[in-house]
Structure formats: structure tokens, C-alpha cells
Amino acid sequence: MTVANSDIVTGTINRGFAARVVARTSGGALRIFLIVVALLWLLPTFGLLIESLRDPSQYANGGWWYAIIHPAQLTFGNYSQLLQNHTMSSGFFNTVKITVPATLLVVLIGSAAGYAFAWMEFPGRDWIFLLVVGLLVIPIQIALIPVVKLYSAMGISGSIISVIMFHVGFGLPFAIFLLRNYFAGIPRDLMEAARMDGASEGRIFFRIILPLGMPAIASLGIFQFLWVWNDLLVALVFSNSASQPLTVALASQTRQFGSSIDILAPGAFLSLIVPLAVFLGFQRFFVQGVMAGSVK
Amino acid sequence: MAHMTLSHVGKVYDDGTRAVTDLSIEIEDGEFLVFVGPSGCGKTTALRMVAGLETITEGEVMIGDRVVNNVPPRDRDVAMVFQSYALYPHLTVRDNIGFGLQLRKMPKPELTKRVEEAAAVLGLSEYLDRKPRNLSGGQRQRVAMGRAIVRQPQAFLMDEPLSNLDAKLRVQMRAEIGRLQRDLKVTTIYVTHDQTEAMTLGHRVAVMKKGVLQQIAAPQDLYDHPDNLFVAGFIGSPAMNFVTGTLVRDDAGAYSVQIGNENITCPASVLAARPALASHVGKPLIVGIRPEDVEDASLVSGHEGRTLSGVAELVEPLGSDLMVHLSTDAPAAASDDMAELGKEIAPVGPLAERTIIVARFSPRSGVQLGKPVTMALDTERLHFFEPTSGMAVWDT
């Protein structure tokens, strides 16, 4: 704050007429363009919402936009039907049971490992980190069959635990990579100051690293949450009818001859609205400049 | 509060770089010791070894009567102020200052009391609930100080704590740090590259170069009796001028120094203070002249036998003085120390050919740019150095 404002140049810069017109209009034009794109992007979601609120008997009369002209068609009937559908409701709870631990574990283990790789001294640290980063290139599909075999040998195939473990295993390399690099950017002086103040490694982790790493941890949490929440492939391979999440339950509703739109539409909308809420809940952690004022 | 001892301390990094060599210093209880030197001289490394942030590869560091070589920083009971302040950005000023006490599980009421006292001492009381980002540079610096003093540690370690402040604030905070240390009487090691800070703050100043301690002495002592060329050139602003001369003894037994074409008479008092000079007759010597020991000869009476002539190349009126850069025919002095000192201030352009002497003239001097000037030297205050070793010529 003590820096004088003298280096701020004041006055007008002499620009050509065309340049000024472009400068005046480009901001507005760009904004309009972005709004149009955003609206187009939202259109299918909006359609899904309307469709989920329509009486199934009206489906034959036309697309979802008819409901905008005839709002009387709208009903919550599909949603109450959905809640009474055991496959769907248990699928929803299974999704929660899989997603929450799979996200928390990845964030927790990933941040602890990220801190260790960034700031703790131990032999072979950088090589082990490279190995972990190298794991990023292994595609999930390659691991499916070996892991199925492993799970059946362990006697956990079909369980929710097995799905969680797979997600955690494949989520960690990216988590460690992301968090290690973010934590490495936290000024060393802060850790040293904490050490001088009497903090142990654990204290430094919980009191300094975690709060300061919140932007990265929140993004990681959202990525991981969305990935696990929306996953179909892993759940299809590892879960059984008792442990299947919402995505598998929804997929089973699509049939060769037509689909049960009255179940699919509200189910899909439900599976979409939860991650959205999570995102909105965490977005305040994306605030830029949390490090401001720390050093220098 | 404790005395500290560094005995034969050395630091070699894993890649073989040597940062500190055989550093031995006794620091008394309550003493303010300043490490000063150019960048890369090992002063910060030395401080960090005392703090426990760098491993000690050679020798021993003692805080009080305890060898702390293998004691982790948190158990050394010393507090450090970082150059970058290293404030915790997510915590308020109150929590920043109280962090160390919280970790030590101090009961809440006492913690609050201590934090508020420290804040009051530093004039931070009204900012206790702000985050660091909402503070000015000077306030942040105070918070960093507060974090150190609130713990009432055995010693303060300060690593260039003022270098991020603007000039005016630096002077103000410098005075404040001096006052705090006097009031608290806590043993302090202070690292800086700014010799003004070193001179004004330190009870003793340790000058370092390339990891080696050059001289440790009280500030005035360091200024008046530098042990070698490096210390002589580093302490003092503007820096001491160096020229090459030859010591001559005439038939009557009087000594003088031949500098270029001019002969400067050496008073008997100089020889009395530096008996070893007599053995240098006929040999080249590096003569050190402080800018304030050079005056415009037209303002001085009785300047025969102690003048040099030059041409004013630059005149900087400072109000109280005229800082005059004069080019002379005197042969320049060259040594490794000169090269080390000159790295940052090497002359360029046509003047690189001539030896420049910087003089602090009285403002009454009528010196004019580009005109010849006769300078009168205060011969009592000349310094002499052995050209090959760079060591000052005293009594041995």
C-alpha cells in the first residue's frame, strides 16, 4: 500500500476513430455473444426440466415446448412416481453413498500426499512423484478386468466399497498432481514461519496448507464429485443390482423400443441438479487472490 | 534471553556449494549483532542455521548453554522475522500474532492479553481484526515483528526485515526496531545488506564476504579501523576511495606517500598508529581515503604537502555537502576485494580510464563542473593496505 500511485499513467491515449469504435462496441458485442451461447447451452437442460414436469399422456401431442404454451400440463406427478420407484430411489442413495466417500477420500489423501511431495524431504521424493504422475496415462478400461478379478479374489465384487475403491484409486494421481503443484506455489516462508512459531508438520498441514490450498482443493473436489456422480462405466462393471447408482438405474430404463421418458426425465434432472448445487455451494472458494498480503 | 555461540560453523549444500566457512562468534546476552555483506555472502545462511531452517554441516551452534545443532526450529525458542514478512494470509492480525502462542496451548485470556500488549507496543491495536491484505507495507512489517515479540523468545532473528519498505518508512522502522530491542533487551541477530542499517542498529557488526567473516567490531571501530580492503570499501557511504601509492622516506627520516606525481606527507601520528608502515618503504601500498577526509584546498589553510589535483566530473549538491566526483591521474588500486566490491558499481564510459575520487566538499566550495580542483587530504585519517593480501597495515 505504500507504493505511490505515481506509476499510473493518466490522460487519454490518442487512438484512431475505428479503434475507438471497436473498443466501444467489442465489449458489448462480446457480452451478447456469450449470453447467446450460454442460453443455447442451457436449452437442453431447460427442455429436460420441462419434460420432467409434463404429464406422460401429453408426450404424443408434441415436444416439451408445447408445455410452455400450455402450462396447465405441468405436474409434479413424475417426481412422486420416481420417489416410489424403488430402483430409482435406491440408485439415488447408492450414488450418494459412492460419491461422497470417493470424493472425500481423494481430497484427503490427495492433499496429504500433495503436501508431502511439495514440502517434506524424504529419499526418492521426486521419483515417486513422477511415478504417480505417470499413472495418469493409464486408461481406466485397461484396469477393468484385472480389478474385477482382484475384487472377486478379495470377495468384495458387487459391493459399494469396490466401486468407491476404484474411483479413489483412479482419482488420486490427478489429485496428487494438482495439489502438489498448487501447494508448491505457497511461499516457503509461510511454512518456515509456522515452523519457527512452533508448528509440527501436522499443524502446518491443517492450519496453513489446507486453508490456503482451498481454491485447488475445492476445484479438485468438484471435479472428482462430478466424475464419480456421472460415472456409468465403472458402476456398470463393478456394481450389482443392489449397489447400482442412479446412472446405471437410468440407463436400464432405456429400452430397445422407446424409453420410459416419465422416469428418465425427472431422474436425469435429479442427477443433474445435485452436482449443480455442489458447484454453487463451493464456488466461493474459487475466490482469487487468497494469498494477497502474505508475503511482501 | 540468552547468549549464543557459533563455533567453527560451516555450511556446504548437497551440491557442494559452500555458503559459510568456519564462522565463530560469541553473542552476548541482550546484544544486537548485525550480519552485513553483499548478496551471496552467507549472512542469511548463517542466520537460518541459527534458526534451524538449514542444517549445520560443520561446527556447533549454542543458544544459551544448549547445543542446538539437532534441535528442530520449534524447540529452539527463537523467533524470526522474515524479509517477506511471511504473514498467514488467511488469518487476522490477531491470529497471526497469536499463532505461536495458540500452538503452545496458552490459555485464552492470557493469550489475548499478550497479543493485545504486543499490538499496543507496535501501534496495531486498531488493526487486530484485519487480514494482512488490508494492511500497508509498514503495518505488515509490524505484524511480523509482533509475531516475534509476543512469544518472548530467547532471541530474535531478523532476515532483512526492512528491505521491502520504501525509504522513508525504512528509516522510521529502523528506529523502531532499535527502540524495541533496547526496551526488550532480547539477544538479536539481524541480517542486512544495507550498511546504514548495520551501523545504526548493531552493537557489533559482523562483515561477511563469500561465506567468511571479515571483521566483527563495534560500528565506529569498523569504520575507523577496518581490517582489510573489503571492510574498508563496504562500510561507509559513499565508499572509501582507493589509490595506489608508494611509501617514501627522505634523508631527514620523514615519511611521505607518492601518489602519481604528487607527494603526500605522512604525519608522525600515522606512523605511530601504524608502526608496521615503516617496513613498507619503497613498496606499493593501497591508500584508502574516505570522502569526508577530502576537502576543497581553497577552503583549507596549510595544505602544503597534502594535496592531489583532479577535475570535477560530477557535482551533486546535497545541501549540507557537495558530493564531488573528481578524476585524477593517481593510479587506481586493483585487488580481488576491489573487484568484489566494484561488481555493483563498476565505472563505465570514458571515466573508466581515470581514477575517480569521490569527495565530500563543504557547500561553500566554488567547485565547478569540468574545472580543475586541488583537493586537500586529511592525512591523519588515511588508511593503508597491503596490495596482495588486502590487509590493513597496522602494527604487525
Image: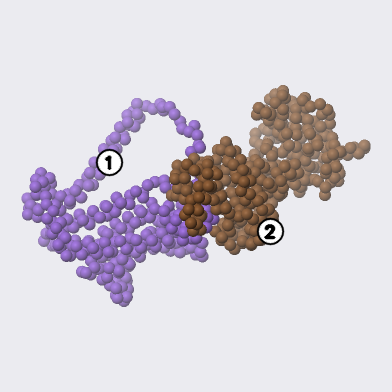
Chain colours: A purple, B brown
Q: Is residue B359 left or right of residue A244?
A: right
Q: Nearer the viewer, residue B105 or B49?
A: B105
For marks 1 and 2, give the CA distance.
68 Å
Q: Quadrant of residue A221?
A: bottom left
Circle 2 sits on which residue? B8
Element type at mark 1? helix
Chain ID, mark 1: A
Give the number of the disc on residue A34: 1
Q: Does the image show residue B54? A: no
Seen at 81% across and 37% down, the residue is B380
**Contact, mark 1 vs mark 2 (Cβ under 8 Å):** no
Chain ID, mark 2: B
Please tell me whether residue B78 is drawn above or below residue B226 in the rendered image: below
How many numbered marks are there? 2
Q: Quadrant of the N terminus of chain B?
A: bottom right
Dot 1 and dot 2 within a common chain: no
Q: How far across and down, in percent of the image, does residue A218 sit?
A: 36, 54
Seen at 25% across and 55% down, the residue is A274
Residue type, label 2: His
Q: Is residue B356 left or right of residue A167?
A: right
Q: Does the image show residue B221? A: yes
Please tell me whether residue B294 is drawn above or below residue A281 in the rendered image: above
Seen at 54% across and 59% down, the residue is B74
Residue extending farthest right: B252
Q: Nearer the viewer, residue A147 or B203?
A: B203
